[in-house]
Image (cartoon, rainbow, N blue to C red):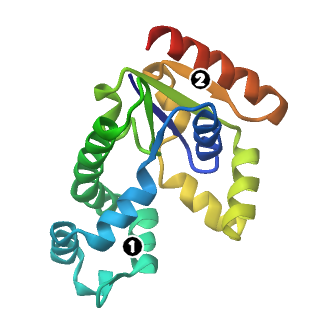
């Protein structure tokens, strides 16, 4: 059984994914895999340079500042980057899932719904948190201003828009209430998987 975990930036999806991992479900983290592919895949590197110019890399190193600026300020550039990188991330996930010796695997991906990846999965979990909680997490985690954090919000679709596409919802505004939600979903997944 393949299950996706998604949510907006600062919503806590990575922490939720870690909780499922601690319960014994292997988790594939799409964002680090995407960064790894952008760094090491000659095909992706070539396509990114063709689309954005050689400044997107410093020698063999990905220019993270230039990439972040594109992703968080230019909708067309972000769409182009996603079209180049995410098919390769999807293939890497499929290979990884086949190599796992588990009846259930998960993929944690911020843009699970935006890329259509959710259509290939057996179930999805959408992690929701209010804007104040998300802002505090981003500002603390990434050491950025509120203005920068709000720009990141604006670069993503509102997670609320994906509610109707999700199999399960987790409200991540109150830490005390999160674990029971995770355990409830875990039990349902294990019953169906």
Nearest to N terminus: mark 2 or mark 1: 1
Query: Under tag 1, what secondary structure?
Result: helix
Q: Where residue 97 sits in the image (x, y, percent)?
A: 33, 37
State the residue at coordinates (62%, 31%): 23
156 or 40, nearer to the observer? 40
Report the residue marked by disc 1.
Answer: 67
Q: For marks 2 and 1, give the CA distance.
A: 31 Å
User: In the figure, 81 relative to 47: above or below?
Assistant: above
State the residue at coordinates (35%, 30%): 118
Classify the position of the C terminus by image quarter.
Answer: top left
The quadrant where residue 42 appears: bottom left
Q: Where residue 153 sits in the image (x, y, percent)?
A: 57, 53
Q: Locate residue 23 relative to residue 120 in the image: left or right.
A: right
State the residue at coordinates (22%, 82%): 53
Q: Locate residue 130 relative to residue 83 in the image: left or right.
A: right
Q: Locate residue 65 relative to residue 153 in the image: left or right.
A: left
User: In the figure, 51 relative to 82: above or below?
Assistant: below
Task: Tell me, for residue 169, which label it has, or none.
Answer: 2
């Amino acid at each position: 059984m393949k299950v996706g975990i998604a949510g907006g930036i600062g919503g806590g999806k990575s922490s939720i994914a870690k909780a499922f991992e601690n319960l014994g479900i292997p988790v594939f983290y799409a964002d680090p895999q995407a960064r790894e592919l952008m760094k090491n895949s000659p095909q992706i590197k070539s396509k990114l340079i063709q689309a954005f110019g050689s400044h997107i890399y410093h020698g063999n190193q990905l220019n993270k500042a230039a990439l972040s600026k594109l992703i968080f300020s230019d909708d067309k550039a972000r769409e182009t980057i996603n079209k180049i990188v995410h098919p390769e991330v999807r293939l890497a996930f499929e290979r990884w899932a086949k190599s796992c010796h588990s009846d259930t695997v998960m993929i944690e991906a911020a843009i699970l719904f935006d890329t259509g990846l959710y259509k290939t999965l057996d179930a999805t979990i959408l992690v929701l948190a209010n804007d104040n909680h998300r802002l505090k997490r981003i500002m603390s985690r990434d050491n950025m201003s509120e203005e920068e954090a709000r720009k990141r919000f604006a670069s993503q679709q509102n997670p609320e828009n994906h509610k109707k596409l999700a199999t399960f919802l987790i409200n991540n505004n109150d830490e005390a209430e999160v674990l029971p939600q995770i355990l409830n979903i875990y039990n349902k997944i294990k019953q169906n998987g």
